[in-house]
Image (cartoon, rainbow, N blue to C red):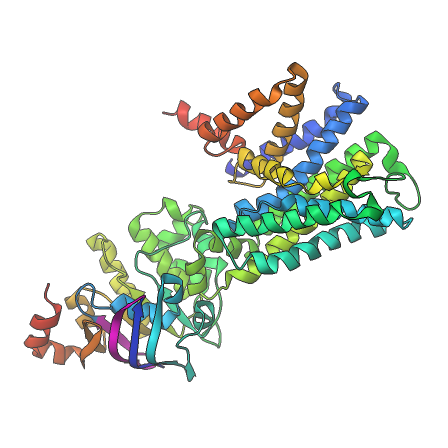
Amino acid sequence: MLRIAALQAGYGQSQVLGEIELAVGAGEVVTLLGRNGMGKTTIVRAIMGLLPALGGRILGGSIRFGGDEVAGWPAHRVARQGLGLVPEGRQVFPSLSVEENLTATAANRAGGPARWTLPAVYALFPRLAERRRNSGAQLSGGEQQMLAIGRALMTNPKLLILDEATEGLAPLIRAEIWAVLAKLKSEGQSILLIDKNLAAVMRLADRHVVVEKGRSVWTGDSAALAADATVREGYLHL
Amino acid sequence: MERLRAAALPLLILGLLAAAPFIGFGAGHELTLLARAMILGMAALGLWLLVGGAGLVSLGHAALLGVGAYAVVVMDAAGITEAAIVAPSAIGAAALFALLTGAVAIRTTGVHFIMITLAFGQMGFFTAASLAVYGGDDGYTLYGRTTLGGARWLEDRLAFHYLCLGLLAATLLACRALLASRFGRVLRATRENPLRAAAVGFNPYPYRLVAYTIAGGIAGLAGALLANATEFVAPSFLAWQRSGDLLFMVILGGLGSPQGALLGALAMVLVEEWLSHLTEHWRLVFGPLLILAVLFLRGGLEGLPAQLRRRRDG
């Protein structure tokens, strides 16, 4: 579904990504692991075509999604191919109501009958239904995160990308989000996930890719990661 | 309750305007003043769509108004005064001008957008001033007001008053409907975070261009009415000072909802008139008044009730 090969990217004069290899198959959940500043968010921005607007660019390599080479495409075109992003820091539209946030950009990009409609998202996050008339700015952090996930789902993406979706949330909300992600996985939703919560991602994900200083240095499943103490000690501990 | 509150203010304003001729504002000069306020209110509504709706601060809106007014002039000189032809031409000409200039201007944002719209506005101004056939610098006096079905009923002050009021109300309703539509939601999303809107698959550019073109059409209609109200059109219609006035009306009224533009236009035209009767040096009072309004009315005039409620509730 998504296949990244030899990706290099950077901002201005500084190269952030040196050599990234990454693949997500249909129905697979893959995580990007690594310490802060290693380039995980830059990978997401490169996939989504967001680098040029942030002063960066792709320097080389390829990003193939669903048969198309999408590296260098404008952001809105990449998203239309069926990539749904839940961005770092949530970034809901603050003056739009919850319902407007969900419906403004709704689409059906996965093809077939739409799995995600307004009632389906409200069933997944009942809190959002209660607050449907509130504006994005009036929501708590956890509610904004639910809204950001709901907004991405409302585009019926082929691949859902979540950048630090559980960061800075209360434990109960965090648990709810993990439960939702597990449900999405059980329905066959392909997911690319960035998260620091090692225990939770090892339960959820099929495969992990460890990023260190802009290079993908290790890849394997949860069992392999659990067995490989040197990877966990060397690249993941703060 | 919230919906009622949102509808109460525009209904009150429109109701007062409807009743104005019968509650002591029926004299010729008063109706002229109110017509001017309503027409500029209509243009301000279009500008609000850009500033409040799309987050595009334009300093060239008077040019669109002027294109509408000059469309009436061109028709008048050719002997065409039928509203069924004149009004669509004015709307179409201004919308086309907006589409062509917007296609360039909307590639930029922020200060650059302000400067480009200002530049296009000035281009319009100097073009109008060089149109010797239509009076050039001196302007052009219309032979008469636009006719409807061959009848000259726009000459009637009351009929003209209610025509302006009806079109103003229709513009307000259209703006509200537009904002609530799918198009309006995407437009507001791109205002708040264009990058985010792009990341969910929406290119802000066509949405903004359509909004700019619609605002142009509204300004064109307002320009045609303004030409009829004054029966005289001059390049000063396109002057950047008028663009500034329109922008100020929108900001004074409040960016929170379209009725702010309506309120701002009425307040500005009426206060200006009232002050100029009090003293010859009214600008010395008007200027500081506007500064105070911007400093202390955070949500504009339209947000004043909410601001007072907050203060009362502590």
Nearest the viewer among A154 and B79 is: B79
Percent across and percent down for residue B231 are 83, 36
As for residue B6 lying within the magenta part, the answer is no
Would residue B82 be visible to someone looking at this image? no
Would residue A32 be visible to someone looking at this image? yes
Would you place residue A5 above or below residue B240 in this image? below
Would you place residue B218 above or below residue A216 in this image? above
User: On the picture, is B261 further left or further right than B190?
Assistant: right
Q: Main secondary structure of the magenta part?
A: strand
Q: Residue B260 sits in which quadrant? A: top right
Q: Residue, x 78% and y 34% (percent of image)?
A: B162
Percent across and percent down for residue A150 are 39, 60
Q: Residue, x 22% and y 59% (percent of image)?
A: A175
User: On the picture, is A110 further left or further right than A218?
Assistant: right
Q: Residue, x 15% and y 67% (percent of image)?
A: A199
Q: Residue furthest top?
A: B278
As for residue A16 lying within the magenta part, the answer is yes
Would you place residue B288 above or below residue A14 in this image? above
Nearest the viewer among B121 and B2 is: B121
User: What span is in magenta?
Assistant: A12-32
Q: Residue A66 sits in which quadrant? A: bottom left
Q: Residue, x 69% and y 55% (percent of image)?
A: B97
